[in-house]
């Protein structure tokens, strides 16, 4: 009798990982880039991040109280959404823009659909898209050039696309973040190190960042040659998007095969928008479009259930 099997309900694989621990890892990974943005763009960068985070946390708490749901603000997911939303703002943006964007991201994109894990779009990116559509002048009208401490609208990608005039910065400045752009375009190097930290911790898998960045690199080499490669990689929000946004659990595919399709699709869309679209940058909209396609990807790459017709045969 001592050899009898004990039956129990799933899950059978247990882990001490919690949402709070995962989100804390993301916050830690973003902190060096945040420090760099304050160094390059000044104190207003910190104001935007604080305003965005407070707005996200308060909005989540109020929404859950109104809907009579358990409060989940302690899981830190709202804090991460607030930070990422702020990372998509120029340092010249007014504080109220961060407040409105975070409130929209949490209330409309996240809580209305059921809260964490049920949203079908990345909340921070959807919030950014809402702000671009509503207050485009504040979102795209002026970026501070850290090298001259003057407002300059010519980001490297805009110069490459021909929508603005100016001289392309040195590659080392793009790597370090000494260029005009939003807070999340600060220091590609620190964002990469933050992404490596997340992979090392097991918070994210390497598949999406590697295939996303790799797809952009291959297309950039084919279309623009090696001279423009690093401008495509280090300019704009590619590193922020590849490591911190495209890897969102709720809006990315669950299988490795699905993640590859998703990442390659995002890379192709990013380069299509950059080269023939109306915007010099395409990361945000590419990830949002692939978010929408994620349920379809999951449907067609899901492994067959054991014992089901068309799946693995249960032979005795």
Image: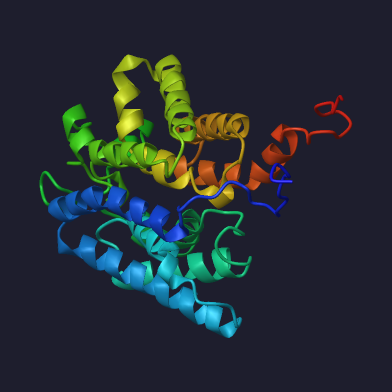
Q: Is residue 193 left or right of residue 214?
A: left
Residue 14 place in picture, x, y as percent: 54, 50
Residue 230 place in picture, x, y as percent: 30, 25
Residue at the right extreme of this rendering: 309
Q: Is residue 266 left or right of residue 113?
A: left
In the rendered view, would you say 178 is above or below 42?
A: above
Residue 177 place in picture, x, y as percent: 21, 41
Count the marks: 0
Decide if residue 11 is in sight here. Answer: yes
Judge by depth and name the residue closer to the eye, 243 or 271. Answer: 243
Q: Residue at x 35, y 73 (%)?
A: 54
Q: Residue at x 54, y 83 (%)?
A: 65
Q: Residue at x 39, y 56 (%)?
A: 21
Q: Quadrant of the C terminus?
A: top right
In the rendered view, would you say 272 is above or below 132?
A: above
Q: Residue 142: which quarter of the image?
A: bottom left
Q: Residue at x 61, y 70 (%)?
A: 112
In the rendered view, would you say 154 is above or below 46?
A: above
Q: How is the image coloured?
A: rainbow
Residue 45 place in picture, x, y as percent: 22, 60
Decide if residue 166 is in sight here. Answer: no
Q: Is residue 127 left or right of residue 141?
A: right
Residue at the left extreme of this rendering: 148
In the rendered view, would you say 120 is above or below 232?
A: below
Q: Residue 315: which quarter of the image?
A: top right
Judge by depth and name the residue closer to the eye, 101 or 278. Answer: 101
């Amino acid at each position: 009798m001592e050899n009898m099997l004990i039956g129990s309900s799933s899950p059978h694989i247990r882990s001490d990982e919690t949402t709070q621990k995962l989100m804390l890892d993301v916050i830690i990974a973003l902190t060096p880039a945040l420090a760099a943005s304050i160094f390059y763009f000044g104190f207003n960068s910190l104001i935007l991040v604080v305003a965005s985070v407070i707005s996200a946390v308060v909005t989540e708490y109020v929404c859950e109280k109104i809907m009579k749901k358990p409060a989940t603000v302690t899981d830190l997911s709202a804090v991460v959404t607030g930070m990422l939303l702020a990372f998509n703002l120029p340092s010249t943006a007014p504080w109220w823009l961060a407040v409105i964007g975070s409130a929209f991201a949490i209330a409309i994109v996240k809580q209305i659909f059921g809260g964490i894990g049920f949203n079908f779009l990345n909340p921070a990116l959807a919030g950014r898209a809402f702000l671009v559509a509503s207050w485009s002048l504040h979102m795209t009208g002026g970026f501070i050039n850290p090298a001259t401490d003057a407002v300059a609208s010519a980001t490297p990608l805009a110069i490459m696309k021909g929508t603005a005039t100016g001289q392309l910065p040195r590659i080392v400045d793009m790597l370090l973040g000494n260029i005009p752009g939003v807070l999340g375009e600060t220091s590609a190097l620190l964002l990469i190190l933050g992404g490596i930290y997340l992979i090392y911790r097991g918070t994210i898998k390497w598949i999406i960042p590697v295939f996303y960045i790799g797809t952009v690199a291959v297309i950039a080499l084919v279309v623009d040659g090696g001279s423009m490669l690093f401008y495509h990689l280090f300019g704009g929000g590619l590193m922020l998007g590849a490591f911190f946004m495209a890897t969102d659990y709720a809006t990315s595919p669950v299988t490795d095969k699905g993640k590859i399709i998703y990442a390659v699709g995002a890379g192709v869309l990013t380069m299509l928008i950059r080269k023939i679209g109306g915007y010099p940058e395409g990361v945000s909209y590419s990830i949002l479009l692939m978010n929408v396609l994620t349920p379809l990807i999951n449907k067609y790459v899901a492994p067959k259930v054991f014992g089901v017709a068309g799946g693995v045969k249960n032979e005795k």
